[in-house]
Amino acid sequence: MCNILVIGDTHGEWGYLASLLLYYQPDICLVTGDFGWWPGLGELPHLALPREVMQHTQIHFLDGNHENHQSLLAAAPRGSFTSQEIAPNIVYHPRGSLMQLPDGRRVFFAGGAKSIDWKQRIRGKTWFPEEILRPSHLPKELPQADIVLSHTIPSAFKVEKYADWGFFDVRYDFSPDKSQETLNQVLQACKPQLWLAGHYHRRIDGHFAATEYHVLDMLYGGLCRPEGLPCTFWLSGGPGIQRQSPGWALPHQAFIPLVENASGLYACADMRELPWDLARLFAKRRTMYRTQKVDGIKGLVPREADSFLNCLCRFHWDPLAALGDRKRDPT
Ligand SMILES: [Zn+2]
Ligand SMILES: [Zn+2]
């Protein structure tokens, strides 16, 4: 059995990604774009993720809008349709490429989408016009596929991206994204049973004709939500019981069993349950963090993934001992 975990936009949040992968230990993790591939601007995943993660999991991704498209095109020119291992254990699936899963199912990749905030970005550095998915980026004859992985979704699904967003900026470009029309053609030709995507930064599950689709939430908030991990979808396999796995940032409901059964470190948990010893340790080691509020749950967010990871790698924390200390502390 090959455990394959698909995950929504990671945006270079390697600390969170490490946490999730250490916890579930899939054989393959597939990211549906906005992976955070920013050579020269951000830390690269194979350098940021700890060795324990890379030993267990091969990381695959397709391109979203927020990536350095020039770098990706240099590795996989348009029309090659060939997946590339662009760094050790990091595989990039360009638009129009295919992957066969161990169970025989064929996955078709169709990355790309429009950045609404492109006017606030720097062309050639933080924004690339190549982000838009066009029919010319795909094979002339689109193949039949069991599964399609894309960044945005076909407009035929009729899901409004910004319907429930609470903020608008006059500089944002809300004009239609041509990538979605291209994906309509992919939908018509590939007729997949399953379609997985990201980009919307929220979880949406639905059906269109014979296609079941799941738009995955971004990684950032999903970990803090008590109802589960809406940023993830298991293509095959599943989590099973892996309570011996160390966890660094955990879904809320996984915190208690983990404290009872394993040793590890936690970066994201309900503040009320975070042992003070650990909070003090973070502070002492100058790991930057701040609180965020997602669906009423407060969590700790590492602002600098590298210092956060360095801090965790150097120190092995025993949660039972820490909780014991806390009980003795009347404050
Ligand atoms: Zn996106
Ligand atoms: Zn995104």
Image (cartoon, helix red, strand yellow):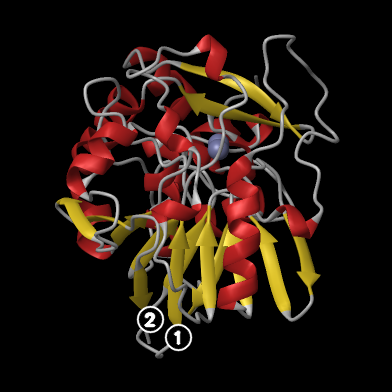
Q: CA distance from mark 2 to mark 1?
A: 5 Å
Residue in front for this viewpoint, 57 or 145: 145
Residue 48 in view: no
Amino acid type, residue under disc 2 in the picture = Leu
Which residue matches tag 2?
101
Q: Is residue 276 left or right of residue 38?
A: right
Please state, as top left, top right, bottom left or bottom right, where the C terminus lies in the image. top right
Q: Quadrant of residue 140?
A: bottom left
Residue 282 badge: none
Callout 2–callout 1 Cβ contact below 8 Å = yes
In the image, is the residue at mark 1 within 8 Å of ligand 1 by its beta carbon? no
> Residue shown at 38%/34% (left/top)?
67
Say which residue label 1 marks: 105
Q: Is label 2 within 8 A of ligand 1 (CB to nearest ligand atom)?
A: no
Residue 162 showing in the rendered view: yes
Q: Is residue 225 above or below residue 135?
A: above
Say what amino acid the circle numbered 1 marks: Arg
Left or right: 42, with 192 as reference point:
left
The quadrant of the picture occupied by the N terminus is bottom left
